[in-house]
Structure formats: C-alpha cells, structure tokens
Image (spheres, helix red, strand yellow):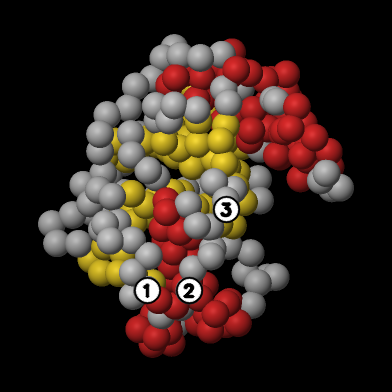
Amino acid sequence: MNHSIQAGEVHIWSVDMDDCGWDAFGSVLSADEREKAQRFRAPNLRQHYQRNRSALRLLLSHYLSRHAAQIEFLYNQFGKPGTVGQLVHFNLSHSNRYAMIAIAAQPVGVDLEFMDRQKTDIHELVEWACHPLEKAALHLLPAAEQALYFYRLWTQKEAYCKVLGIGLNHALPALRFEAARDAAGCLVVDENGASAAPFFVHRVPCPDGYAASVCLSRDDARISLFSATPEDHIFQSTEAHQARIY
C-alpha cells in the first residue's frame, strides 16, 4: 500500500510503543540505530526507541516507495532528521508509551507530551518557558486547568522549534500565539525573529493524559489522523480531523 501527500496536507500517525508486534521489524534498522538503541540502559527505553524507529521506516517506505531498510537519514546540527532527496518532510515525537509521526509535503514539526502532573513542577517550567502574557493568562485559570493549559503551550512551542530544526535552542518566552482569522491554526509570534516566514500551530487530538501540536507554514492545513499497527503492515485510518486550538 502506497501513500501520497499533497501540499497543505499533514498525515499524523500514532504508534503504541508498548506493542511488542513492532519487534518483528527490527531488521529494518540501520547499524547506527541499533548501536544507539544499545546505549539506552533502561530496557523499556531501548524497546521504545527500536519500535518507533521501525515504525518510522515502515511508514516512510509507503510514501517513498522504497524498502524500509534502504532509507537513508541525514541530520542537521541539532539532530533533526531528513531523508536523502527529501521527497517528503517528517517529524517524530514520543512520550511515555506513544509516538507521533507527522508526514507532510512541506517542513513540519510535531510534539507529543505526556502530562505527568504528579512528577512535574509546572510552575518552575512556566517561569522558564512562558511569555509574560501566557503567565498572566495561566494565573487566571483554576488550579485544575493550569497543567493542561501549560502542556498545550509547551507542545506548540516545541513543535515550532522542531519545524525550524533548532530543537529547544530558542528563548521560549519570546514565543506566543495569536488566533489566525478564519483559520483553524494559531499564528506563531516569534519576538526573536528566528523565522521571517509565518508559521502556524494546530492542536492534535491525542489519547487522554497527553497534549500534542503540529506546526507548519499553513494556516489551512488539512490534518488527517491514522493509527500505525505492526500486523501485516496494516495502517488503519481513523477519522480525519481539522484540528483546532481551543
């Protein structure tokens, strides 16, 4: 089964990294991926890395009409991967048991975060990551809603940094978001001017307890969600969404 992607489309694939069925495809990994996997001391982290990389290769093989094991990755100075020839753009994020893989015809960044409210002190992170306007808005919210608000902001900021290929090498308090008129996404306002081109973030539906966002240079992105499963290379489509930030 081959997939194609058109301008303005984003295909977002959800991968359950606790599914041991992915282990059957470990042979598609490159030597350097296997070596990196062995550097993870925790067995679950090693398994999750191998499984999400296997899923990434299998997915890209359908878009590129290329054998999964033959796909070559290139990395920029901050570690953002691309493929030789760059026929499609992609980005991967993983947190806890799930991974998200975004595939588009233009540069794309995706971020998925598990909202571990028991272990994460969001108030310390707010001081480090939030714009003054965001801090003011957060303090007006009931305590029960503050964590969700923060995690959504965090995924938006990280998705933007990832689409630029700079990771978190950016002053996050310089980023804020404005609702885009007549569009589903929010405009990224970068007060440090890291990009002259406009970018937009879109909320992505995800499992309970998670927050996710995708970023690209389209305010009218058509976002389709899929579930990637290892059985017989079947990739099951879920309902397509026009994701909105609320």
Please indicate, yes or no, whether residue 240 appears anywhere in the rendered image.
no
Image position of 203 with respect to 136: above or below: above
Q: Depth check: give the residue in front, 133 or 204.
A: 133
Quote the CA–CA distance across marks 1 and 2: 8 Å
Q: Secondary structure at mark 3?
A: loop
Residue 164 position within the rendered picture, expressed as x and y whole percent measured from the top left: 42, 54
Mark 1 or mark 2, which has the lower sequence index? 2
Residue 29 position within the rendered picture, expressed as x and y whole percent measured from the top left: 69, 25
Residue 117 position within the rendered picture, expressed as x and y whole percent measured from the top left: 62, 69
Q: Quadrant of the N terminus?
A: top left
Which residue is at the far right?
Answer: 41
Disc 1 residue crowd, few under 14, some 14–19, many 20+, Cα 10 Å:
few
Residue 120 placement, left or right of 64: right
Residue designated by label 2: 171
Residue 48 placement, left or right of 217: right
The residue that appears at 76% across and 45% down in the rendered structure is 45
Mark 3 or mark 2, which has the lower sequence index? 3
Disc 3 residue crowd, few under 14, some 14–19, many 20+, Cα 10 Å:
few
Quote the CA–CA distance across marks 3 and 2: 15 Å
Residue designated by label 1: 192
Q: Depth check: give the residue in front, 156 or 192.
A: 192
Marks 1 and 2 close (CB-CB < 8 Å): yes
Image position of 222 with respect to 218: above or below: above
What amino acid is at disc 1?
Answer: Asn
Residue 117 placement, left or right of 141: right
What amino acid is at disc 2?
Answer: Ala
The residue that appears at 33% across and 49% down in the rendered structure is 216
Mark toward the viewer: 3 or 2 = 3
